[in-house]
Amino acid sequence: MIALKNVYKSFGDNSVLEDISVFFEQGKTNLIIGQSGSGKTVLLKSIIGLHQIDSGEIIYGDKEFSRMPIKEKKEIRKEIGMVFQGGALFDSATVEENVMFPLEMFTNMTKAEMLDRVNFCLSKVNLENVNKLYPAEISGGMQKRVSIARAIALNPKYLFCDEPNSGLDPKTAIVIDQLIRELTLEFNMTTVVNTHDMNSVIEIGDKIVFIFEGKKWWEGNRDDILTTENKELEEFIFASDLMRKFKHLKVDL
Amino acid sequence: MKIFYHIGRYFILLSKVFSRPEKTKIFLKAVVREMDNLGINSLGIVIIISVFMGAVITLQTAYNLENPLIPTYLVGLTARDSMILEFSSTIVGLILAGKVGSNIASEIGTMRISEQIDALEIMGVNSASHLILPKIIGAVLINPFLTIISIFVGIFGGYLATVFTGAITPDSYIYGIHYVFIPFYITYALVKTVVFAFIITSVPAYHGYYSSGGALEVGRASTMAVVYSSVLILLFNVLLTQLMLA
């Protein structure tokens, strides 16, 4: 589990996060949602330590992360898998080398053991016969899947995904969502997904945190969210025609 | 005042760069790869430039020393010492600052904006050390060889010039390149090469590592990297010359 207590973050005079307190549960897909510019990417980057928070606490398990010495932070980071918005695969390395990278860096596995693990991770994300291809030679959806495979290579306790569906067609986006959910359940990870995709919210939102103007505005699950009376959240969720129709359909049902 | 900010940040980055690699085997592999990327891949341009530089120095010296009181073998001596003292280390350094420097800044800058550096950090890898240290060590190890090759090729270029133009006799040129050879000049050239290798890898790496935004900023970082590396090479050329030859 990951707990945030009274987290504040600002850049100069611009306050981006204000008094965020959240609890992300293990074995569940926790979503951070919000409009562009609401502060959700800063929140995610603060949780994983890419931004230093101004005040508050970020607790992994029972360890306070934000003020930890770098050596201890590195140990926690080995338990973290991250899927970036653009995949962040190493351009100069093949798919196989990308997934193998954390294994080479942090394990004493033999080459054969590493290859087995790479193939296992790639099979988990339904990728075959792409080992020798470079990121530029595969589609965006496949790049996201390779990124997930790399993220789970070291059996992480925590999985973070920054807008994993951005730039993907709806069908591929659903595949990615389902993959994240399946892997979370299978490996009992604490998964935190940053998204503004409403399909993801309905598909995989075990726990949802709505960020509005840098503050935690609402917290609940995918069932609660459709019946919310929170004005800002309602405006965010039912911004599209399709979602408004869906809302009425639910009411009719 | 911004210059002090950059100098401070550059040294903070260097303190991160010079830390123990995560895995020695991976580090050594990366060093060899960088020696190939930054050194061996630059061999062609170094040879082309050196042969023409050697030829031009020889011809210019020969045409400017048309005095019966000055022995013609001094043309060979001038070509040799010019190549050793200045051209093979400094001019090749400046050319590599353009070729290698822009390459390093754009490579690391692209990794920064495409979040590949963030990915390394999140995995618990010291990204600065992992990406930059092999480049610095690789260049520091391979560039002295490039300089030695440049010296030989440049002197050979001068010889070719004497053969094909007849500005002086080839025998006189060969006598000149053997005349009053000071071995310390080689040490001086190699020390300069090592310092320049450090500059042309660490300065562009700094510009790439701290680039932000998009392709435009990476391009700008690449340009800045070449400009600053070149200026620093010229500055350290003066400092090292005063320190070592005065």
Image (cartoon, rainbow, N blue to C red):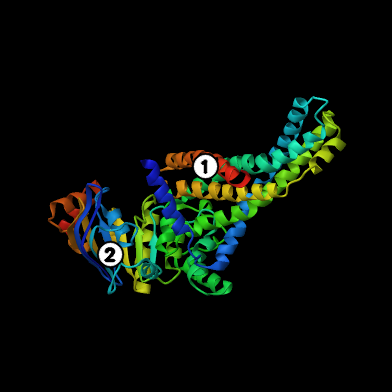
Query: Residue A239, labelled with which disc?
Result: none
| Residue that carries the numbered disc 2 in the rendered image | A30
The amino acid type of the residue labelled 2 equals Asn
Examine the rendering and report whether any part of residue A197 can be seen.
no
The amino acid type of the residue labelled 1 equals Leu
A18 or A187, nearer to the observer: A18
- The reply to whether dot 2 and dot 1 touch (C-beta < 8 Å) is no
B217 or B76, nearer to the observer: B76
Image quarter where the N terminus of chain A lies is bottom left
For label 2, the SS is: strand
Q: Which residue is drawn at the image coordinates 36% and 71% (left, top)? A: A157
For label 1, the SS is: helix
From the image, state whether disc 2 or disc 1 is nearer to you.
Answer: 1
Respond whether the residues carrying marks 2 and 1 are from the same subunit. no
Decide if residue B156 is on the left or right side of residue A24: right
x%, y% of residue B39? 64, 50
x%, y% of residue A226? 19, 58
| Distance Cα–Cα, label 2 vs label 1 | 51 Å
A202 or A85, nearer to the observer: A85
Decide if residue A68 is on the left or right side of residue B200: left
x%, y% of residue B106? 50, 45
x%, y% of residue A83? 39, 60
| Residue that carries the numbered disc 1 in the rendered image | B232
Q: Which residue is drawn at the image coordinates 47% and 58% (left, top)? A: B17
Q: Which residue is drawn at the image coordinates 75% and 30% (left, top)? A: B61
B210 or B230, nearer to the observer: B230
Q: Which residue is drawn at the image coordinates 63% and 44% (left, top)? A: B245
